[in-house]
Image (tube, grey):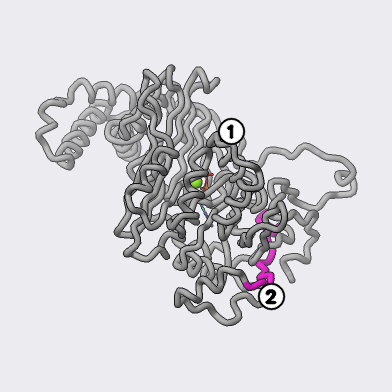
Protein backbone atom coordinates (compact mmCIF):
# COMPACT_ATOMS: atom_id res chain seq x y z
CA UNK A 1 0.00 0.00 0.00
CA UNK A 2 1.58 3.24 -1.21
CA UNK A 3 0.40 5.26 1.75
CA UNK A 4 2.09 2.99 4.22
CA UNK A 5 5.35 2.49 2.37
CA UNK A 6 6.96 5.61 3.84
CA UNK A 7 8.47 4.98 7.20
CA UNK A 8 5.56 5.46 9.54
CA UNK A 9 7.29 5.64 12.89
CA UNK A 10 4.64 4.38 15.23
CA UNK A 11 1.49 2.41 14.71
CA UNK A 12 -0.73 4.21 17.15
CA UNK A 13 -3.76 2.18 18.06
CA UNK A 14 -6.94 4.22 17.72
CA UNK A 15 -7.42 4.18 21.47
CA UNK A 16 -3.97 5.61 22.05
CA UNK A 17 -4.24 8.13 19.28
CA UNK A 18 -3.60 11.08 21.57
CA UNK A 19 0.06 10.06 21.46
CA UNK A 20 0.98 11.40 18.06
CA UNK A 21 4.38 10.84 16.55
CA UNK A 22 4.84 12.84 13.39
CA UNK A 23 7.82 12.37 11.08
CA UNK A 24 10.51 9.70 11.11
CA UNK A 25 12.94 9.77 13.99
CA UNK A 26 16.46 10.58 12.81
CA UNK A 27 19.40 8.69 14.34
CA UNK A 28 20.11 11.70 16.58
CA UNK A 29 16.57 12.14 17.79
CA UNK A 30 15.45 8.55 18.07
CA UNK A 31 17.39 7.93 21.26
CA UNK A 32 15.87 10.77 23.25
CA UNK A 33 12.76 12.85 23.32
CA UNK A 34 13.11 16.28 21.79
CA UNK A 35 10.64 19.09 22.45
CA UNK A 36 8.23 19.51 19.53
CA UNK A 37 8.48 23.05 18.12
CA UNK A 38 5.14 24.90 17.96
CA UNK A 39 3.33 24.46 14.62
CA UNK A 40 3.41 27.62 12.59
CA UNK A 41 -0.40 27.85 12.70
CA UNK A 42 -0.46 28.33 16.45
CA UNK A 43 2.30 30.89 16.73
CA UNK A 44 1.02 34.31 17.85
CA UNK A 45 -0.02 36.59 14.95
CA UNK A 46 2.00 39.80 14.47
CA UNK A 47 0.98 42.71 16.73
CA UNK A 48 -1.58 45.10 15.20
CA UNK A 49 -0.17 47.79 12.92
CA UNK A 50 -0.62 51.50 13.67
CA UNK A 51 -3.30 51.64 10.99
CA UNK A 52 -5.22 48.75 12.60
CA UNK A 53 -5.00 50.45 16.00
CA UNK A 54 -6.31 53.67 14.44
CA UNK A 55 -9.20 51.81 12.75
CA UNK A 56 -10.11 50.01 15.96
CA UNK A 57 -10.23 53.28 17.88
CA UNK A 58 -12.33 54.79 15.14
CA UNK A 59 -14.72 51.85 15.31
CA UNK A 60 -15.20 52.35 19.04
CA UNK A 61 -15.77 56.09 18.51
CA UNK A 62 -18.32 55.56 15.76
CA UNK A 63 -20.10 52.92 17.79
CA UNK A 64 -20.34 55.30 20.77
CA UNK A 65 -21.66 58.13 18.58
CA UNK A 66 -24.14 55.71 17.06
CA UNK A 67 -25.46 54.64 20.45
CA UNK A 68 -25.84 58.33 21.45
CA UNK A 69 -27.75 59.21 18.30
CA UNK A 70 -30.02 56.20 18.01
CA UNK A 71 -33.63 56.71 18.97
CA UNK A 72 -34.20 53.29 20.58
CA UNK A 73 -37.78 54.12 21.50
CA UNK A 74 -38.74 55.12 17.98
CA UNK A 75 -36.97 52.09 16.48
CA UNK A 76 -39.08 49.57 18.37
CA UNK A 77 -42.04 50.41 16.13
CA UNK A 78 -40.06 49.67 12.94
CA UNK A 79 -39.48 46.38 11.15
CA UNK A 80 -36.00 44.89 11.87
CA UNK A 81 -34.93 45.26 8.24
CA UNK A 82 -35.82 48.97 8.22
CA UNK A 83 -33.90 49.45 11.48
CA UNK A 84 -30.82 47.79 9.98
CA UNK A 85 -31.00 49.97 6.89
CA UNK A 86 -31.37 53.13 8.94
CA UNK A 87 -28.54 52.22 11.27
CA UNK A 88 -26.28 51.37 8.35
CA UNK A 89 -27.06 54.76 6.81
CA UNK A 90 -26.26 56.47 10.09
CA UNK A 91 -22.93 54.61 10.34
CA UNK A 92 -22.13 55.68 6.78
CA UNK A 93 -22.73 59.33 7.73
CA UNK A 94 -20.55 59.00 10.81
CA UNK A 95 -17.78 57.37 8.75
CA UNK A 96 -18.01 60.13 6.19
CA UNK A 97 -17.28 62.71 8.84
CA UNK A 98 -13.85 61.00 8.81
CA UNK A 99 -13.67 61.35 5.01
CA UNK A 100 -10.29 61.50 3.48
CA UNK A 101 -8.85 59.37 6.22
CA UNK A 102 -10.64 56.18 5.18
CA UNK A 103 -10.42 54.31 1.88
CA UNK A 104 -13.78 53.10 0.55
CA UNK A 105 -12.74 49.52 1.36
CA UNK A 106 -11.88 50.47 4.93
CA UNK A 107 -15.16 52.34 5.25
CA UNK A 108 -17.18 49.29 4.07
CA UNK A 109 -15.32 47.01 6.49
CA UNK A 110 -15.79 49.49 9.33
CA UNK A 111 -19.51 49.73 8.59
CA UNK A 112 -19.80 45.91 8.66
CA UNK A 113 -17.92 45.77 11.94
CA UNK A 114 -20.03 48.45 13.62
CA UNK A 115 -23.17 46.63 12.38
CA UNK A 116 -21.83 43.37 13.90
CA UNK A 117 -21.09 45.20 17.12
CA UNK A 118 -24.57 46.70 17.24
CA UNK A 119 -26.73 43.79 16.12
CA UNK A 120 -24.52 40.73 16.36
CA UNK A 121 -21.70 39.26 18.35
CA UNK A 122 -18.98 41.75 17.44
CA UNK A 123 -15.67 40.22 16.32
CA UNK A 124 -17.18 36.72 16.53
CA UNK A 125 -19.43 37.40 13.56
CA UNK A 126 -16.54 37.02 11.09
CA UNK A 127 -15.82 33.54 12.46
CA UNK A 128 -19.48 32.58 12.61
CA UNK A 129 -19.90 33.47 8.93
CA UNK A 130 -16.99 31.20 7.98
CA UNK A 131 -18.40 27.70 7.31
CA UNK A 132 -14.98 26.05 7.67
CA UNK A 133 -14.72 27.01 11.36
CA UNK A 134 -16.01 24.15 13.53
CA UNK A 135 -14.81 25.23 16.97
CA UNK A 136 -14.02 28.66 18.42
CA UNK A 137 -11.93 28.75 21.59
CA UNK A 138 -11.44 32.14 23.23
CA UNK A 139 -8.74 31.78 25.87
CA UNK A 140 -8.45 35.54 26.42
CA UNK A 141 -9.80 38.65 24.72
CA UNK A 142 -6.78 38.67 22.39
CA UNK A 143 -6.20 34.92 21.98
CA UNK A 144 -8.87 33.32 19.87
CA UNK A 145 -8.20 29.83 18.47
CA UNK A 146 -10.31 28.14 15.82
CA UNK A 147 -10.53 24.65 14.44
CA UNK A 148 -10.71 24.33 10.66
CA UNK A 149 -10.87 20.92 8.97
CA UNK A 150 -9.61 19.22 12.10
CA UNK A 151 -6.66 21.59 12.65
CA UNK A 152 -6.36 24.15 15.42
CA UNK A 153 -5.13 27.64 14.44
CA UNK A 154 -4.68 30.93 16.24
CA UNK A 155 -6.95 33.42 14.50
CA UNK A 156 -6.35 37.14 14.12
CA UNK A 157 -9.77 37.96 15.59
CA UNK A 158 -9.46 39.91 18.83
CA UNK A 159 -11.74 41.61 21.27
CA UNK A 160 -10.81 45.10 22.44
CA UNK A 161 -10.34 44.09 26.03
CA UNK A 162 -11.84 41.88 28.73
CA UNK A 163 -14.83 44.19 29.14
CA UNK A 164 -15.64 43.90 25.43
CA UNK A 165 -15.45 40.08 25.54
CA UNK A 166 -17.59 40.06 28.68
CA UNK A 167 -20.19 42.22 26.95
CA UNK A 168 -20.48 39.71 24.09
CA UNK A 169 -20.68 36.80 26.56
CA UNK A 170 -23.51 38.60 28.40
CA UNK A 171 -25.31 39.11 25.11
CA UNK A 172 -25.09 35.38 24.22
CA UNK A 173 -26.03 34.16 27.67
CA UNK A 174 -28.83 36.73 28.07
CA UNK A 175 -30.40 35.67 24.76
CA UNK A 176 -31.19 32.23 26.21
CA UNK A 177 -32.47 33.61 29.51
CA UNK A 178 -29.38 32.74 31.53
CA UNK A 179 -26.87 34.93 33.26
CA UNK A 180 -23.27 34.88 34.30
CA UNK A 181 -21.66 36.89 37.10
CA UNK A 182 -19.19 36.57 39.94
CA UNK A 183 -21.61 34.45 41.96
CA UNK A 184 -22.29 32.14 39.03
CA UNK A 185 -19.15 32.40 36.96
CA UNK A 186 -19.79 29.61 34.42
CA UNK A 187 -22.65 29.04 32.08
CA UNK A 188 -23.82 26.92 29.13
CA UNK A 189 -25.79 28.58 26.37
CA UNK A 190 -26.37 28.29 22.65
CA UNK A 191 -26.37 30.58 19.66
CA UNK A 192 -29.34 31.16 17.39
CA UNK A 193 -27.90 28.67 14.87
CA UNK A 194 -27.76 25.90 17.49
CA UNK A 195 -24.03 26.19 18.25
CA UNK A 196 -23.17 25.20 21.82
CA UNK A 197 -21.51 27.79 24.04
CA UNK A 198 -19.69 27.54 27.36
CA UNK A 199 -18.52 30.69 29.08
CA UNK A 200 -16.46 31.02 32.24
CA UNK A 201 -15.35 34.26 33.87
CA UNK A 202 -13.19 35.39 36.80
CA UNK A 203 -12.68 34.50 39.59
CA UNK A 204 -12.78 30.96 38.11
CA UNK A 205 -11.03 31.95 34.87
CA UNK A 206 -7.72 33.43 35.93
CA UNK A 207 -6.83 35.41 32.80
CA UNK A 208 -10.18 37.06 32.16
CA UNK A 209 -13.35 35.73 30.53
CA UNK A 210 -13.01 32.63 28.34
CA UNK A 211 -15.53 31.07 25.99
CA UNK A 212 -15.77 27.91 23.87
CA UNK A 213 -18.18 27.58 20.97
CA UNK A 214 -18.95 24.26 19.29
CA UNK A 215 -20.36 25.05 15.89
CA UNK A 216 -22.73 22.89 13.95
CA UNK A 217 -23.70 25.63 11.54
CA UNK A 218 -27.06 26.01 9.89
CA UNK A 219 -26.37 22.80 7.96
CA UNK A 220 -25.02 20.16 10.34
CA UNK A 221 -23.03 17.22 8.99
CA UNK A 222 -25.15 14.39 7.61
CA UNK A 223 -24.33 10.68 7.45
CA UNK A 224 -23.36 11.04 3.80
CA UNK A 225 -20.86 13.77 4.78
CA UNK A 226 -19.38 11.54 7.48
CA UNK A 227 -18.92 8.72 4.96
CA UNK A 228 -17.38 11.15 2.47
CA UNK A 229 -14.95 12.33 5.17
CA UNK A 230 -14.03 8.69 5.83
CA UNK A 231 -15.57 8.53 9.33
CA UNK A 232 -16.81 4.99 8.57
CA UNK A 233 -17.55 2.85 5.51
CA UNK A 234 -21.04 2.73 3.92
CA UNK A 235 -21.51 -0.86 5.15
CA UNK A 236 -21.13 0.29 8.78
CA UNK A 237 -23.78 2.90 8.14
CA UNK A 238 -26.13 0.21 6.77
CA UNK A 239 -25.72 -1.74 9.97
CA UNK A 240 -26.12 1.25 12.30
CA UNK A 241 -29.19 2.49 10.41
CA UNK A 242 -30.77 -0.97 10.76
CA UNK A 243 -29.85 -1.11 14.46
CA UNK A 244 -31.55 2.25 15.09
CA UNK A 245 -34.68 1.20 13.23
CA UNK A 246 -34.75 -2.09 15.14
CA UNK A 247 -34.70 -0.15 18.42
CA UNK A 248 -31.30 -1.25 19.70
CA UNK A 249 -30.12 0.75 22.71
CA UNK A 250 -27.01 2.59 21.61
CA UNK A 251 -24.25 4.37 23.53
CA UNK A 252 -21.91 6.62 21.57
CA UNK A 253 -18.62 6.80 23.41
CA UNK A 254 -15.64 9.07 22.74
CA UNK A 255 -13.36 11.83 23.93
CA UNK A 256 -14.02 15.56 23.83
CA UNK A 257 -14.87 16.76 20.34
CA UNK A 258 -14.59 13.27 18.86
CA UNK A 259 -17.89 13.62 16.98
CA UNK A 260 -20.33 11.93 19.41
CA UNK A 261 -23.15 14.47 19.16
CA UNK A 262 -22.77 14.65 15.38
CA UNK A 263 -23.16 10.87 15.15
CA UNK A 264 -26.14 10.89 17.47
CA UNK A 265 -27.79 13.57 15.38
CA UNK A 266 -27.13 11.65 12.17
CA UNK A 267 -28.32 8.29 13.50
CA UNK A 268 -31.54 9.79 14.81
CA UNK A 269 -32.58 10.19 11.19
CA UNK A 270 -33.41 6.47 11.14
CA UNK A 271 -35.94 6.70 13.96
CA UNK A 272 -39.31 6.07 12.28
CA UNK A 273 -41.37 9.26 11.97
CA UNK A 274 -44.33 7.91 13.96
CA UNK A 275 -42.26 7.29 17.10
CA UNK A 276 -42.37 9.88 19.85
CA UNK A 277 -38.87 11.02 20.79
CA UNK A 278 -37.95 13.05 23.86
CA UNK A 279 -34.51 14.65 23.99
CA UNK A 280 -32.82 15.79 27.19
CA UNK A 281 -29.75 18.01 27.09
CA UNK A 282 -27.82 20.50 29.22
CA UNK A 283 -27.53 22.93 26.33
CA UNK A 284 -29.75 21.89 23.45
CA UNK A 285 -27.59 21.10 20.41
CA UNK A 286 -29.31 18.10 18.82
CA UNK A 287 -31.17 18.91 15.64
CA UNK A 288 -33.50 15.98 15.11
CA UNK A 289 -35.43 15.95 11.88
CA UNK A 290 -38.35 13.85 13.17
CA UNK A 291 -41.78 15.48 13.38
CA UNK A 292 -42.69 13.89 16.75
CA UNK A 293 -40.00 15.32 19.05
CA UNK A 294 -40.18 17.09 22.40
CA UNK A 295 -36.94 18.86 23.41
CA UNK A 296 -36.10 19.38 27.07
CA UNK A 297 -33.20 21.31 28.57
CA UNK A 298 -31.87 21.28 32.13
CA UNK A 299 -31.80 24.45 34.22
CA UNK A 300 -29.04 25.64 36.54
CA UNK A 301 -29.95 26.98 40.01
CA UNK A 302 -30.81 30.68 40.39
CA UNK A 303 -28.88 33.18 42.53
CA UNK A 304 -30.43 31.87 45.72
CA UNK A 305 -29.35 28.37 44.70
CA UNK A 306 -32.92 27.31 43.97
CA UNK A 307 -34.86 26.15 40.94
CA UNK A 308 -32.31 23.73 39.53
CA UNK A 309 -33.72 21.08 37.21
CA UNK A 310 -31.25 18.26 36.61
CA UNK A 311 -31.02 15.77 33.77
CA UNK A 312 -32.22 13.16 36.26
CA UNK A 313 -35.37 15.18 37.03
CA UNK A 314 -36.02 15.50 33.31
CA UNK A 315 -35.51 11.78 32.60
CA UNK A 316 -37.97 10.89 35.38
CA UNK A 317 -40.44 13.45 34.10
CA UNK A 318 -40.10 12.40 30.51
CA UNK A 319 -41.07 8.83 31.35
CA UNK A 320 -44.50 10.25 32.18
CA UNK A 321 -44.68 11.89 28.76
CA UNK A 322 -45.24 8.64 26.89
CA UNK A 323 -41.99 8.56 24.96
CA UNK A 324 -41.17 5.76 22.54
CA UNK A 325 -37.51 6.67 22.78
CA UNK A 326 -35.46 8.85 25.08
CA UNK A 327 -32.34 10.57 23.80
CA UNK A 328 -30.00 12.07 26.38
CA UNK A 329 -27.42 14.40 24.84
CA UNK A 330 -24.75 13.26 27.26
CA UNK A 331 -24.84 11.05 30.35
CA UNK A 332 -22.69 12.56 33.09
CA UNK A 333 -24.15 11.39 36.37
CA UNK A 334 -27.09 9.98 38.25
CA UNK A 335 -29.51 10.29 35.31
CA UNK A 336 -27.75 7.21 33.90
CA UNK A 337 -29.68 4.97 36.29
CA UNK A 338 -33.03 6.29 35.08
CA UNK A 339 -31.91 6.07 31.48
CA UNK A 340 -30.87 2.43 31.83
CA UNK A 341 -34.14 1.66 33.54
CA UNK A 342 -35.96 3.31 30.64
CA UNK A 343 -33.92 1.22 28.20
CA UNK A 344 -34.84 -1.93 30.13
CA UNK A 345 -38.51 -1.13 30.46
CA UNK A 346 -40.05 -0.57 27.09
CA UNK A 347 -38.25 2.52 25.84
CA UNK A 348 -35.72 0.57 23.88
CA UNK A 349 -34.17 2.35 20.96
CA UNK A 350 -32.87 4.98 23.36
CA UNK A 351 -29.51 6.59 22.75
CA UNK A 352 -26.97 8.70 24.56
CA UNK A 353 -23.31 9.74 24.48
CA UNK A 354 -20.65 9.28 27.12
CA UNK A 355 -17.05 10.39 27.57
CA UNK A 356 -14.88 7.26 27.44
CA UNK A 357 -11.80 6.04 25.63
CA UNK A 358 -13.05 2.62 24.55
CA UNK A 359 -16.16 0.46 24.86
CA UNK A 360 -14.99 -1.37 27.97
CA UNK A 361 -14.16 1.93 29.62
CA UNK A 362 -17.62 3.17 28.58
CA UNK A 363 -19.26 0.21 30.36
CA UNK A 364 -17.25 0.88 33.54
CA UNK A 365 -18.17 4.56 33.41
CA UNK A 366 -21.84 3.67 33.08
CA UNK A 367 -21.52 1.54 36.21
CA UNK A 368 -19.84 4.37 38.11
CA UNK A 369 -22.50 6.85 37.00
CA UNK A 370 -25.33 4.52 38.01
CA UNK A 371 -23.78 4.22 41.44
CA UNK A 372 -23.88 8.06 41.68
CA UNK A 373 -27.67 7.77 42.00
CA UNK A 374 -26.96 6.77 45.60
CA UNK A 375 -28.69 3.37 45.78
CA UNK A 376 -26.85 0.55 47.38
CA UNK A 377 -26.90 -1.83 44.45
CA UNK A 378 -24.51 -4.81 44.64
CA UNK A 379 -21.79 -4.44 41.97
CA UNK A 380 -22.78 -7.57 40.07
CA UNK A 381 -26.46 -6.62 39.92
CA UNK A 382 -25.46 -3.17 38.75
CA UNK A 383 -23.18 -4.54 36.04
CA UNK A 384 -25.87 -6.99 34.93
CA UNK A 385 -28.37 -4.20 34.59
CA UNK A 386 -25.96 -2.11 32.51
CA UNK A 387 -25.09 -5.11 30.32
CA UNK A 388 -28.70 -6.04 29.69
CA UNK A 389 -29.73 -2.47 28.85
CA UNK A 390 -27.06 -1.62 26.30
CA UNK A 391 -26.92 -3.35 22.90
CA UNK A 392 -24.26 -1.43 21.03
CA UNK A 393 -21.39 0.92 21.76
CA UNK A 394 -20.10 3.10 18.96
CA UNK A 395 -16.64 4.43 19.72
CA UNK A 396 -15.79 7.80 18.14
CA UNK A 397 -12.24 9.13 18.03
CA UNK A 398 -10.46 12.26 16.91
CA UNK A 399 -7.28 10.79 15.46
CA UNK A 400 -3.83 12.23 14.87
CA UNK A 401 -4.14 15.14 12.42
CA UNK A 402 -7.73 15.89 13.46
CA UNK A 403 -9.83 13.39 11.46
CA UNK A 404 -12.81 11.92 13.27
CA UNK A 405 -13.59 8.26 12.81
CA UNK A 406 -15.73 5.54 14.29
CA UNK A 407 -12.98 3.26 15.54
CA UNK A 408 -15.19 0.49 16.93
CA UNK A 409 -18.71 -0.79 16.82
CA UNK A 410 -19.02 -3.19 19.73
CA UNK A 411 -21.92 -5.40 20.73
CA UNK A 412 -22.71 -6.15 24.37
CA UNK A 413 -23.87 -9.75 24.68
CA UNK A 414 -24.67 -10.04 28.40
CA UNK A 415 -22.64 -11.42 31.30
CA UNK A 416 -20.20 -14.26 31.67
CA UNK A 417 -19.58 -14.81 35.36
CA UNK A 418 -18.81 -11.38 36.79
CA UNK A 419 -17.74 -9.86 33.48
CA UNK A 420 -19.60 -8.09 30.74
CA UNK A 421 -19.29 -9.99 27.48
CA UNK A 422 -18.67 -7.87 24.42
CA UNK A 423 -17.27 -8.27 20.93
CA UNK A 424 -16.17 -5.88 18.20
CA UNK A 425 -18.15 -6.00 14.96
CA UNK A 426 -16.24 -3.31 13.08
CA UNK A 427 -12.92 -1.67 13.94
CA UNK A 428 -10.53 0.88 12.49
CA UNK A 429 -6.90 -0.09 12.60
CA UNK A 430 -4.55 2.82 12.27
CA UNK A 431 -1.35 2.07 10.36
CA UNK A 432 0.40 5.41 10.61
CA UNK A 433 0.10 8.94 9.30
CA UNK A 434 0.16 10.34 5.75
CA UNK A 435 2.32 13.20 4.52
CA UNK A 436 -0.16 15.77 5.92
CA UNK A 437 0.03 14.19 9.36
CA UNK A 438 -3.43 12.60 9.13
CA UNK A 439 -4.02 9.12 10.54
CA UNK A 440 -4.40 6.40 7.92
CA UNK A 441 -5.47 2.80 8.29
CA UNK A 442 -8.21 0.29 7.46
CA UNK A 443 -11.70 -0.42 8.56
CA UNK A 444 -12.07 -4.11 9.35
CA UNK A 445 -15.20 -6.18 9.64
CA UNK A 446 -14.34 -8.81 12.26
CA UNK A 447 -16.59 -11.47 10.76
CA UNK A 448 -18.81 -11.82 13.85
CA UNK A 449 -22.53 -11.93 13.16
CA UNK A 450 -24.09 -9.85 15.96
CA UNK A 451 -26.83 -11.15 18.21
CA UNK A 452 -28.89 -8.11 17.29
CA UNK A 453 -28.90 -9.20 13.61
CA UNK A 454 -31.80 -11.54 14.46
CA UNK A 455 -33.67 -8.73 16.16
CA UNK A 456 -33.09 -6.55 13.09
CA UNK A 457 -34.35 -9.25 10.71
CA UNK A 458 -37.35 -10.06 12.91
CA UNK A 459 -38.43 -6.49 12.34
CA UNK A 460 -38.43 -7.10 8.61
CA UNK A 461 -35.25 -5.14 7.94
CA UNK A 462 -33.10 -7.00 5.43
CA UNK A 463 -29.35 -6.80 5.85
CA UNK A 464 -26.98 -7.43 2.91
CA UNK A 465 -25.99 -11.13 2.95
CA UNK A 466 -22.26 -10.39 3.19
CA UNK A 467 -22.53 -7.48 5.65
CA UNK A 468 -20.72 -9.35 8.43
CA UNK A 469 -18.22 -11.23 6.25
CA UNK A 470 -14.68 -10.88 7.63
CA UNK A 471 -12.82 -8.40 5.42
CA UNK A 472 -10.97 -5.11 5.04
CA UNK A 473 -13.72 -2.65 4.14
CA UNK A 474 -13.84 0.01 1.42
CA UNK A 475 -14.03 3.58 2.62
CA UNK A 476 -13.02 6.95 1.19
CA UNK A 477 -9.81 8.39 2.73
CA UNK A 478 -8.81 5.27 4.57
N1 LIG B 1 -16.67 12.76 10.90
C1 LIG B 1 -16.46 14.06 11.01
N2 LIG B 1 -15.73 14.70 10.08
C2 LIG B 1 -15.48 16.01 10.20
N3 LIG B 1 -15.93 16.80 11.19
C3 LIG B 1 -16.66 16.21 12.14
C4 LIG B 1 -16.97 14.82 12.10
N4 LIG B 1 -17.70 14.51 13.19
C5 LIG B 1 -17.85 15.67 13.87
N5 LIG B 1 -17.24 16.68 13.25
C6 LIG B 1 -17.15 18.08 13.70
O1 LIG B 1 -16.35 18.04 14.87
C7 LIG B 1 -16.84 18.92 15.87
C8 LIG B 1 -17.08 18.13 17.14
O2 LIG B 1 -18.17 17.26 16.95
P1 LIG B 1 -19.20 16.90 18.11
O3 LIG B 1 -19.75 18.11 18.76
O4 LIG B 1 -20.16 15.95 17.51
O5 LIG B 1 -18.23 16.17 19.14
P2 LIG B 1 -18.56 15.65 20.61
O6 LIG B 1 -17.79 14.38 20.76
O7 LIG B 1 -20.03 15.58 20.82
O8 LIG B 1 -17.91 16.80 21.49
P3 LIG B 1 -18.13 17.11 23.07
O9 LIG B 1 -17.38 16.06 23.80
O10 LIG B 1 -17.50 18.45 23.23
O11 LIG B 1 -19.59 17.08 23.31
C9 LIG B 1 -18.11 19.55 15.28
O12 LIG B 1 -17.79 20.82 14.79
C10 LIG B 1 -18.49 18.63 14.14
O13 LIG B 1 -19.14 19.34 13.09
MG1 LIG C 1 -21.22 16.44 22.29
The circle on residue 295 is: none
Q: Is residue 461 magenta?
A: no
- Whether residue 287 is situated above or below residue 372 in the rendered picture: below
Identify the residue at image location x=41%, y=40%: 283
Residue 456: horizontal and vertical position, in percent? 50, 72
Q: Estimate the spatial distance between the alpha carbons at disc 2 and disc 1, rounded to whole Å.
A: 49 Å
User: Magenta residues?
Assistant: 433-449
Q: Earlier in the sequence, mark 2 or mark 1?
A: 1
- Whether residue 69 is situated above or below residue 191 in the rendered picture: above
Q: Nearer the viewer, mark 2 or mark 1?
A: 2
- Give the position of the N terminus as an image quadrant: bottom right
Which is more toward the observer, 101 or 171? 171
Residue 436: horizontal and vertical position, in percent? 66, 56
Marker count (numbered): 2
Find residue 300 and report its image quarter. top left
Residue 426: horizontal and vertical position, in percent? 64, 66
- Give the position of the C terminus as an image quadrant: bottom right
Which is more toward the observer, 374 or 223? 374
The circle on residue 470 is: 2
Find residue 84 and report its image quarter. top left
Identify the residue at image location x=72%, y=48%: 20
The circle on residue 44 is: 1
Amino acid sequence: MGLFSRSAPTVASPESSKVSVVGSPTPETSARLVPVPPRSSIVAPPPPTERQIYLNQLKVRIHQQLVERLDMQGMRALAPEVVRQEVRQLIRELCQSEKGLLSSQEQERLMDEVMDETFGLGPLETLLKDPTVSDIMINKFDRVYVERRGRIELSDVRFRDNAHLRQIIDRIVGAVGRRIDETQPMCDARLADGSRVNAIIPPLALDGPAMSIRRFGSKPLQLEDLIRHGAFPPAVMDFLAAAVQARCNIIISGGTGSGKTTLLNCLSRYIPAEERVITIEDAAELQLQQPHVVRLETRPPNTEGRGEVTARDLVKNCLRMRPDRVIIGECRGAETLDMLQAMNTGHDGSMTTIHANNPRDAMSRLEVMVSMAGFDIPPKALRTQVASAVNLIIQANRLVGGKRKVTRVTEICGMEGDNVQMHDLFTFEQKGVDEDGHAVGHFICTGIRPKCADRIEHRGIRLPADLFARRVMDSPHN
